[in-house]
Amino acid sequence: MDWQTPLKFQQTDFVKRLRSGLNQLLFCQLENHFSELVIISEPDLKPLREAAWLVTEKQKNLDSVHEVFLKNLAGKLGEEAINKQLNDLLSRANYKDLIRANDKKSFNARQWKIFITYIKAYQYLEQFLPVNLFPVGRLRLSSNPSASLQVKVAQGNAETVRWSVTREDVKRNAVIVCVLVSEEVDEAQSNYHLVLSGFLPTYLIEVNGDETSIGLENLLYTGGLRGFLQVLQAEADESKRPSSNKPMGPETSKSTETLATIQIGTWEYPLSIEQISRLKEAIQELLNRHQSAKPQQGSPAISKRSSMLASLWNGVLKQIQPATTQAILRKHSRLLSFDGERAQIGISSEALFSMNPKWLLKVEEAFTELLGREIEVNVEVMGG
């Protein structure tokens, strides 16, 4: 009997219980302990929304900002569910998660300044990358960052739910982990029940064409995920250990040659060879373009961000009545920045809101109506 057989039998039992109701699932709130069900609610949702907005800003070809944000939020919920159970095996996801953790205790003032400088440099470089260095849902093992797991999140009924897996997912990851969100992902939702629905090593997934779909019956029971990842970790540790029979050569030193670590103070993040290669490509692209250290007006990154802000502001203005107020605000104001919690509005004149103090309240109410939560609105007079 191979290692998969017990997990398949357990998965069959799990699927029956899931389809009988969430109250039939194993639930444990202890971190790094297995649970079939994970509950995420406030205040843990706030940093996940912020992280989702940060990712949304970098998405290309935005048709609907809000839809893309909700998709990214679903991905962040899946990441959080896995992190709660495997935090001791996974690397600190990326700078976005460090920012949302708001934990400056491990940094002194100088180290924090260096970190912010690094982040700004990364944000500038990232616009030249073909894809995001840290895609939503991709997590890496702390001891073996070349081995990643992709978290797939789906919403729907346990009877019919399926997860889409692309050829690229299989190529770039060691494991696919599937999570089912019981509630509809929405900005105003304050409580989510996430079901760890199963996993599959990518070498077991066959993709005909560009993508395939996986159902509950195709998966292995998630209770075996920790053990599988520990095997990957042990293999990585073994590959780093020099052989007692021969001196360390190119083969045995390969894993250390293909990794680098960004380290500032007590915080560190290991990069895989894939990420390092992409950064090199980005730097080369910069050199080829002979650009200055700051993006120029009209660059793809700025145009993309401006388009996203304009789309969000248009959605806010549609909430404002009467139509005459909406028209005036549309002509004499615009959204300068938005980080998920605070909006900076540019106005053509101080008189716009000083003569109509209720208009600012209308803008705040419009943000709340559109996004489902209160947003801090600040105003500044635009130059020129």
Image (spheres, helix red, strand yellow):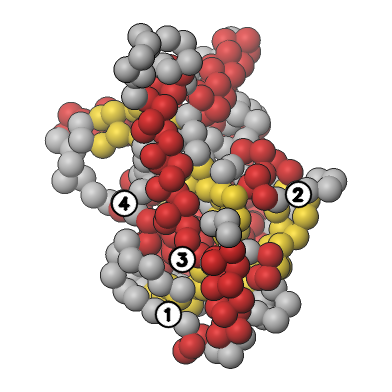
Amino acid type shown at disc 1? Leu
Q: Please tell me whether residue 24 is drawn above or below residue 232 in the rendered image.
A: below
Would residue 156 be seen by someone viewing this image from the given angle?
Answer: yes
Q: Write the residue at 43% across / 45% down.
A: 231
Whichever of callouts 2 and 3 sits on the residue coming sooner in the sequence is 2
Badge 2 density bin: few <14, some 14–19, many ≥20, Cα 10 Å: few
Could you tell me how far apart the alpha carbons at marks 3 and 4 are, in whole angstroms?
16 Å
**Label 3 element class:** helix
Instruction: Kindly identify which residue carries mark 2.
Output: 206
350 relative to 213 in the view: left or right:
left
Q: Nearer the viewer, mark 3 or mark 4?
A: 3
Amino acid type shown at disc 3? Gly
Amino acid type shown at disc 4? Asp
Q: Write the residue at 45% across / 75% down.
A: 37
Instruction: Kindly identify which residue carries mark 3.
Output: 223
Q: Write the residue at 60% across / 84% down.
A: 16
Residue 60: image quadrant is top right
Give the percent coordinates (x, y) of residue 365. 49, 74
Could you tell me how far apart the alpha carbons at marks 2 and 3 are, in whole angstroms?
23 Å
Could you tell me how far apart the alpha carbons at marks 2 and 1 are, in whole angstroms?
30 Å
Q: Please tell me whether residue 45 is drawn above or below residue 306 in the rendered image.
A: below
Give the percent coordinates (x, y) of residue 63. 73, 54
**Label 1 element class:** loop
Whichever of callouts 3 and 1 sits on the residue coming sooner in the sequence is 1
Instruction: Kindly identify which residue carries mark 4.
Output: 88
Q: Are marks 3 and 4 in contact (CB under 8 Å)?
A: no
Would residue 315 be seen by someone viewing this image from the given angle?
Answer: no
